[in-house]
Image (cartoon, helix red, strand yellow):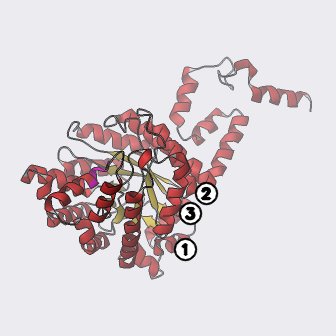
Amino acid sequence: MTQISYARKGEITPEMRAVAKQEGLSPEIIAKGVANGEIVITCNSKYSLKHPCGIGKGLRTKINANIGSSTDCCDIKLEKKKAQVAREAGADTIMDLSTGGDLRKFRKVIQETFAGPIGTVPIYQIATETVKSKGGIVFMTSNDIFKVIEEQAKDGVDFITVHCGVTREVFDRLCAQKRIMDIVSRGAAFLITWMLANKKENPLYEHFDRLLDIAYKYDVILSLGDGFRPGAIGDATDRAQIQELLILGELKERANKRGVQVMIEGPGHVPLNEVAMNIQLEKKICQGAPFYVLGPIVTDIAPGYDEITSAIGGAIAASAGADFLCYVTPAEHGGLPNIDEVRRGIIASKIAAHAGDIVKGIKGAKERDNELSKARKKLDWDRQTKLAIDPEILKKFRSERKPKMSEVCTMCGDYCAIKIVEDAIKKHK
């Protein structure tokens, strides 16, 4: 039984109750959202997760942090530290995108360290293992793919990115229209390479029912990946991207009917004026499925500052209805992020998510801003720090930049507007 199955039978699970408590909503609202595919809950049925995470309509916008090794940087201690930082900085989930070293070992360490919902992209493990054992990606088989997917589900992974919409038809359309950047999705690149070499359809699409069997067995969320997402703002919302989205909408419907939870992944590089439209398209085409977006990154000319360009896009996306933001670090287009860059990426995404939640009217979002503003008026620095998204940075500023009067800051010093007005009001009472 899966969360959808229980919800459709009118049964409220402990996970639904836990999410309801976290969000300040009734369990019935959560159950209704799960039943109709507008909310998903991370809760692999074979693994006891202390804090399941609800993602979807009416819930706080969630944040994911990507970490993991590469062939150039394979340090398990470093990735463990990143997982710790992600937990401390407030990421709701982690995705392990490792492609170097003992992938199963990396996943286990990250899972134990983060102690929250974990996602993966199984095709990464499939591709790297096939290269090692057979000499090339083109030699992987359908059985190899589904064997690894089930292994990861059995190991307790809560959600998996699967590029089921990467089909021969959509690839032909991409080739015909031409792009600035063809394909930037690593998972899609692996699959397209295999499909072209073997002259076959994508196994994840062709044998989708086999994937559903595994997902249902373990109640693993299928995060239907956007293999044709734009990697340049000049490619955004083109025919290949939209054709893939149409396919994902059909697959989402099939999965929900089977009792399998589904999210849809979205772009990518998108100009500012097309962000809200992309959210609206996904919600319409995919029947309100939770939307998981990378950024979006709204300009291509700021490598090294990608946490800023993605936070701008993320705030607009969240306010328009996106449910789940994948963080982007400053190193996104330059290399594997270090520990500080992971933290900066999470904080930037949390700001974007919160800004969107205010617009969406999420319970408690605007209230938190109001409480901090009241504390600022009172010059109550302890309260401001407690309410801040990043308490540590405010503590750092206060400890490094000591004003003459402890209640003010060094921006205005003796001429603090708040204190001047407060004193003036007291004198004229």
Q: Nearer the viewer, residue 7 or 168?
A: 168
Q: Secondary structure at mark 3?
A: loop
Give the amino acid type for the residue marked by disc 2 in the picture: Lys
Task: Name the residue tied to disc 1.
Answer: 28
Question: Can residue 34 be found in the magenta stretch?
Answer: no
Classify mark 3: residues with Cα within 10 Å, few (<14), some (14-19) or many (20+): many
Please, which residue is most extreme toward the left here?
134
Residue 234 in sight from this viewpoint: yes
Q: Is residue 90 above or below residue 75?
A: below
- The Cα–Cα distance between marks 3 and 1, rounded to whole angstroms, is 13 Å
Classify mark 2: residues with Cα within 10 Å, few (<14), some (14-19) or many (20+): many
Name the image quarter holding residue 126: bottom left
Q: Position of residue 154 (x, y in %)?
A: 24, 64
Please, which residue is most extreme toward the front here?
176
State which region is magenta: 183-188
Q: Nearer the viewer, residue 50 or 416?
A: 416
Residue shown at 65%/21% (left/top)?
410
Give the foreground label among 3 and 1.
3
Q: Is residue 401 above or below residue 318?
A: above
Q: Which mark is residue 154?
A: none
Q: Secondary structure at mark 2?
A: helix
Task: Name the residue tied to disc 2.
Answer: 360
Q: Quadrant of the C terminus?
A: top right
- The Cα–Cα distance between marks 2 and 3, rounded to whole angstroms, is 8 Å
Task: Name the residue tied to disc 3.
Answer: 58
Please, which residue is most extreme toward the right here?
428
Give the amino acid type for the residue marked by disc 1 in the picture: Glu
